[in-house]
């Protein structure tokens, strides 16, 4: 069997067994990708162009939109290209880059979702202190810390993954370079360094999840005490989708990365990968912003100004 020094490319899992289904999956993924680009692009445009949206909540939404664009652009274009050209190959360097950027974007996104739960907690539970706790400097510091943590974690995990000798072939049973599938190509069935690293990261992720849950418990308790029914409805409509996205993201990531090696089904693994890598970047614009009146007004103003300039 070849070792890692002789692996020049990996073979990804095809989206379907027949050519017709491959083309069907290509058009389906193309539609999803364009929807994600459109939704996140509109949010980025609205927040960047409208000064009224230069607030902490919309600053974090802008960061989330940029991360979603990067995350879905890391996995889907290569999968669509392989489906369109009926190939499975991805170069070794391309696989390394895909792992690095995917870990970078999902790490920063999860950190940002944790920060956004704190933002909602302060806005609802401590509204009088909102400007003090979340001024422009604090927001920039938290965002920079999230992006920096993403760079550090992705560097460490990518280096740890591809430093392992590979002697089980080069077939990755996923439509992108997913780390659990790459680790199955390792010469040893269990690697102590990787196990310790994974457990440490899982503890950090679980700690963030506990912080998010505690924040939302405090939020829901405060919302229930609101005298205004309209205020309660607005608070719940803002916070519940956030919690749903975090829960979907975490549950699928935990299944993909922490399940035992013997618990595996290609179809289930494929579906889970879609749920945590494709669905959140596509739905986040709809869940967080497209129902937001301020975002809609900002986009209407931007388009009206562009139309006026053209005329």
Image (cartoon, rainbow, N blue to C red):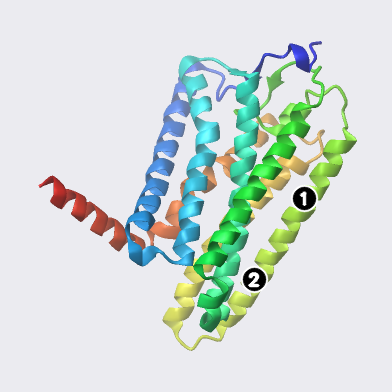
Query: To which residue does mark 1 refer?
Result: 202
Secondary-structure class at tag 2: helix
233 vs 122, nearest the viewer: 122
| Residue at (59% x, 43% y) in the render | 105
Secondary-structure class at tag 1: helix
| Residue at (61% x, 29% y) in the render | 97
Mark drawn on residue 114: none
92 vs 75, nearest the viewer: 92
Are there few (<14), some (14-19), or many (20+) residues within 10 Å of tag 1?
some
Are there few (<14), some (14-19), or many (20+) residues within 10 Å of tag 2?
some
| Residue at (48% x, 28% y) in the render | 25
Query: To which residue does mark 2 refer?
Result: 215
Query: Left or right of 58: which side holds 91?
Result: right
Q: Between disc 1 and disc 2, whose residue precedes? A: 1
4 vs 84, nearest the viewer: 4
- The image shows residue 10, relative to residue 56, as above or below, that is above
Residue 301 sits in which quadrant? bottom left
Query: Left or right of 51: which side holds 249?
Result: right
Residue 144 sits in which quadrant? bottom right
Residue 170 sits in which quadrant? top right
Name the residue furthest bottom: 227
Could you tell me if residue 292 is visible in this image? no
Name the residue furthest left: 311
């Amino acid at each position: 069997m070849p070792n890692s020094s002789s692996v020049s490319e990996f073979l990804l899992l095809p989206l379907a067994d027949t050519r017709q289904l491959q083309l069907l999956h290509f058009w389906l993924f193309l539609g999803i990708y364009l929807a994600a680009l459109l939704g996140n692009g509109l949010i980025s445009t609205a927040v960047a162009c409208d000064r009224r949206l230069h607030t902490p909540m919309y600053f974090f939404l802008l960061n989330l939109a940029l991360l979603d664009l990067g995350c879905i652009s890391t996995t889907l274009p290569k999968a669509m290209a392989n489906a369109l050209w009926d190939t499975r190959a991805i170069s070794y360097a391309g696989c390394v880059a895909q792992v690095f950027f995917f870990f970078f974007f999902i790490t920063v996104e999860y950190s940002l979702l944790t920060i956004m739960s704190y933002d909602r907690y302060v806005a609802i539970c401590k509204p009088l202190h909102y400007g003090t706790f979340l001024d422009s400097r604090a927001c920039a510091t938290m965002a920079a810390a999230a992006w920096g943590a993403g760079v550090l974690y992705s560097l460490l995990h990518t280096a740890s993954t591809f430093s392992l000798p590979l002697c089980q072939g080069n077939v990755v049973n996923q439509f992108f370079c997913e780390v659990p599938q790459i680790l199955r190509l390792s010469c040893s069935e269990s690697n102590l360094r990787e196990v310790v690293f994974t457990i440490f990261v899982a503890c950090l992720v679980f700690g963030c999840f506990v912080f998010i849950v505690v924040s939302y418990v405090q939020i829901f308790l405060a919302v229930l005490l609101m005298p205004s029914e309209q205020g309660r409805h607005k608070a719940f409509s803002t916070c519940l989708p956030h919690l749903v996205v975090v829960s979907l993201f975490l549950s699928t990531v935990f299944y993909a990365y922490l399940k035992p090696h013997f618990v595996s089904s290609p179809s289930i693994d494929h579906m889970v990968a879609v749920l945590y890598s494709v669905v959140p970047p596509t739905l986040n614009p709809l869940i967080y912003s497209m129902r937001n009146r301020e975002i809609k007004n900002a986009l209407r103003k931007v388009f009206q100004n562009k139309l006026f300039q053209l005329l």
